[in-house]
Amino acid sequence: MYRVEDKYFISKNEMYCLQKRLSNVLRSDSYESSIEGYCVSSLYFDDLRGSCLRDTVEGNRIRYKYRIRIYNNSLKTIKMEVKEKYDSRVCKRSKSITEEEMQMLIHGECIENILAKDDPATRFNLAIQTRGLRPEVIVTYERKAFVYEPGNVRITLDRNIRSSKNVLKFGVPEISYDFLEGQDEILEVKYDEFIPGFLLQLLQIENMQQIAYSKYQLCRERYQKK
């Protein structure tokens, strides 16, 4: 199923107010490790032509992202994900993998899959074999997330966005990062077909501005400029 995914720039003060507001009425995400939320780290892949980055920069209607994701700097849960975006709607295919499988993907090797279209491993393997898919950048940030089951609504507040080109050390706690400046407080609102009116009221901020924003794009581009 394709979901709506809207993104907004907000200030630190607005993020604080929103977090306090939402905490009173919504349930926190299950990955939460503290009252402030949890850490998300993603290793993004691209092919030899840089198709994923180019499609994002050019704003093509259909675009893909390939990534491996962990939480709270732990390899206990490792997710392989293929994210397909059609305009503002997103379909994410995800599955758990082992640390050994993660290392295989990082080094350009295919992993076992069930040869099903919906299995992200099928798509990863095909991209590795035909397009030279390889790891490009690590993107890490802190996230506070709230969920509301009717409409499958998920609201996330992301901050302290940072990146690293040291892709072979993905999952190592001591890795060194470069922080984004002036672009690191983001509100994301995701839902299936509708979002209840009371949530829209809770999310109202005077200067809130919807944006086309990609953490992956910004973190890739910062290294291309050097």
Image: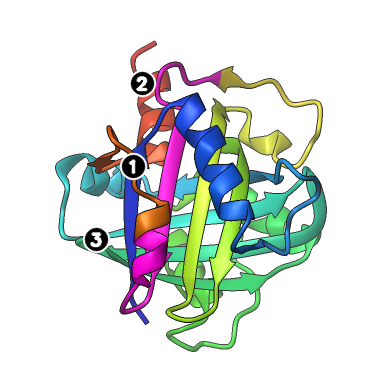
Residue 212 in percent (x, y) is at 25, 43
> In the figure, 45 relative to 66: above or below?
above
Q: Which residues fall within the magenta stretch?
A: 179-200
Alpha-carbon distance for marks 1 and 2? 25 Å
Return the residue at label 2: 224
Residue situated in front as seen by the camera: 144 or 126: 144
Q: Is residue 170 visible?
A: yes
Closer to the chain start, of discs 3 and 1, is 1
SS assignment at label 1: strand
Horizontally, is 23 left or right of 71 in the view? left
Dot in front, 1 or 2: 1
SS assignment at label 3: loop
> In the figure, 93 relative to 80: above or below?
below
In the rendered image, the quadrant that contains the C terminus is top left
Asked if residue 202 lies in the magenta stretch, the reply is: no
Closer to the chain start, of discs 2 and 3, is 3
Horizontally, is 98 left or right of 79 in the view? right
Three-letter amino acid code at the position of disc 1 = Tyr
Tell me if label 3 and label 1 are in contact, CB under 8 Å: no
Horizontally, is 153 left or right of 221 in the view? right
